[in-house]
Image (cartoon, rainbow, N blue to C red):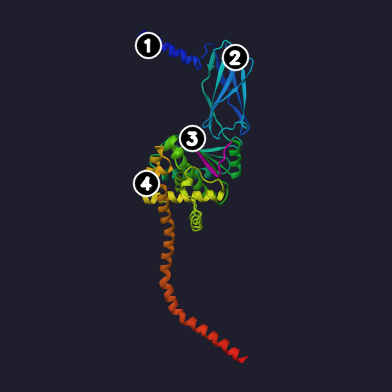
């Protein structure tokens, strides 16, 4: 028994000696003020620090999703203030993320005090945001009437219902935040300032946030129907798969998201047909990890992903999509996941898809031609004699004219 007690004391001593913090018993108290920041520029952290023993060193620890912890030396301003200015230009933070921070104070008697965690939401405060919400979504926008936000909210709800038909196990894991910018340029400036490189819309699954650009005009409703369900699908897939979401092939990830759009892009099929006829289709294996960066090839990649995923859904049913997701949740690589879920390798699947899509298009053309063939025969039977008479009469007229000459 004594040995066990001794072991406990030794382990405790080692734990404390390894640099873990202990709360000082010297009346230390830190009261932070709300951080003040200019989006993309700097954040000023201020706090009141009271202690019976003067501080020797004050550190500010900042944590945000997807980044390593930051440790900065805060300045102590007697008698009881501390300040730290964080540069957002040198170390950008993810837009719309929750920033968690705490203070670690070392006193002159070598005691160390660590404050509780404090937090704030890092929003794009260059705009005055309005909000509309329900149980599942919060829509934030800064330009337009509330009817605009209501349309986004309704579209998100419809997208959620459509997704649950395909994948009913989407986890209810908190609200989804949707931020609507009024132009692509305003959205792009936000991304540049936060060190991100999105395009028209983006989903940040870890944050549960969607960012879209929806300029005013006749195309706005179509863009809402396209962007909002697409980006929502990425978040719902993440909530199903958790950390294994990163293992999902890009073609399947984007393919499912495009399938969730209210009105998928009608130009995809035309673009696919042209690429197929010219032999320019991208091998699906090349779309497992990443999509091309240039606009034209990226558009083709999205078209292929959408079409292939639609083929899987039509041929194998929703169960085929679910089986694929389950396979990739196990950590299987791109081709192996297809083999396990659909019992064929990726190249076989690609060949089946091309045969079904492009041979079908050719057959539809032939069928359409055969449909009109009887009418062409009737047309020929009726009008051929008349056409022949007109041709012969013309020849006769030319012969007579030559004879006169």
Q: Position of residue 157 (x, y in %)?
A: 45, 43
Q: Are marks 3 and 1 in contact (CB under 8 Å)?
A: no
171 versus 314 height, above or below: above
Mark 2: which secondary structure? strand
Q: Earlier in the sequence, mark 3 or mark 1?
A: 1
Q: What residue did someone put label 2 on?
A: 55
Q: Are marks 1 and 2 in contact (CB under 8 Å)?
A: no
Mark 1: which secondary structure? helix
- In the displayed structure, does residue 271 sit left or right of residue 316? right
- In the displayed structure, does residue 130 sit left or right of residue 250? right
Q: Which of the two residues, 352 or 236, is positioned nearer the viewer here?
A: 352
> CA–CA distance between discs 1 and 2?
38 Å
> CA–CA distance between discs 4 and 1?
56 Å
Quadrant hosting residue 42? top right
The dominant secondary structure in magenta is loop
176 versus 380 height, above or below: above
Q: Position of residue 192 (x, y in %)?
A: 60, 38
Few, some or many residues within 10 Å of mark 3 (<14, 14–19, 20+)? some
> CA–CA distance between discs 3 and 2?
37 Å
Q: For residue 206, which numbered disc appears in the image? A: 3
Q: Are marks 4 and 1 in contact (CB under 8 Å)?
A: no
- In the displayed structure, does residue 167 sit left or right of residue 404? left
């Amino acid at each position: 028994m004594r040995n066990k007690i001794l072991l406990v004391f030794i382990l405790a001593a080692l734990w404390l000696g390894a640099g873990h913090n202990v709360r000082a018993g010297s009346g230390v108290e830190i009261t932070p003020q709300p951080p003040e920041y200019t989006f993309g520029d700097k954040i000023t952290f201020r706090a009141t620090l009271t202690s019976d023993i003067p501080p020797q060193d004050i550190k500010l620890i900042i944590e945000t999703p997807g980044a390593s912890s930051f440790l900065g030396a805060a300045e102590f301003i007697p008698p009881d203030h501390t300040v730290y200015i964080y540069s957002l230009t040198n170390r950008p933070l993810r837009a719309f993320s929750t920033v968690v921070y705490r203070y670690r104070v070392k006193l002159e008697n070598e005691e160390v005090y660590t404050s509780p965690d404090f937090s704030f939401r890092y929003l794009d405060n260059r705009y005055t945001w309005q909000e509309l919400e329900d149980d599942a979504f919060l829509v934030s926008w800064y330009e337009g009437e509330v009817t605009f936000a209501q349309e986004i909210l309704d579209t998100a709800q419809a997208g959620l219902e459509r997704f649950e038909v395909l994948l009913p196990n989407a986890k209810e894991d908190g609200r989804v935040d949707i931020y609507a910018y009024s132009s692509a340029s305003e959205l792009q400036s936000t991304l540049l300032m936060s060190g991100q490189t999105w395009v028209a819309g983006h989903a940040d699954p870890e944050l549960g946030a969607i960012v879209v650009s929806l300029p005013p005009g006749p195309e706005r409703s179509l863009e809402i129907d396209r962007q909002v369900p697409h980006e929502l699908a990425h978040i719902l897939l993440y909530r199903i798969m958790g950390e294994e979401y990163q293992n999902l092939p890009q073609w399947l990830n984007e393919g499912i998201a495009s399938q969730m759009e209210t009105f998928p892009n009608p130009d995809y099929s035309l673009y696919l047909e042209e690429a197929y006829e010219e032999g320019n289709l991208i091998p699906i294996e090349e779309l497992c990890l990443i999509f091309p960066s240039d606009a034209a090839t990226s558009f083709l990649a999205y078209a292929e992903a959408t079409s292939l995923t639609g083929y899987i859904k039509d041929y194998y049913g929703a169960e085929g999509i679910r089986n694929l997701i389950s396979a990739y949740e196990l950590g299987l690589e791109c081709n192996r996941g297809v083999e396990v879920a659909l019992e064929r390798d990726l190249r076989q699947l690609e060949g089946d898809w091309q045969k079904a899509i492009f041979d079908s298009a050719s057959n539809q053309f032939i069928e359409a031609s055969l449909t009109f063939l009887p009418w062409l025969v009737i047309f020929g039977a009726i009008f051929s004699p008349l056409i022949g008479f007109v041709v012969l009469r013309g020849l006769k007229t030319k012969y007579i004219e030559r004879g006169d000459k």
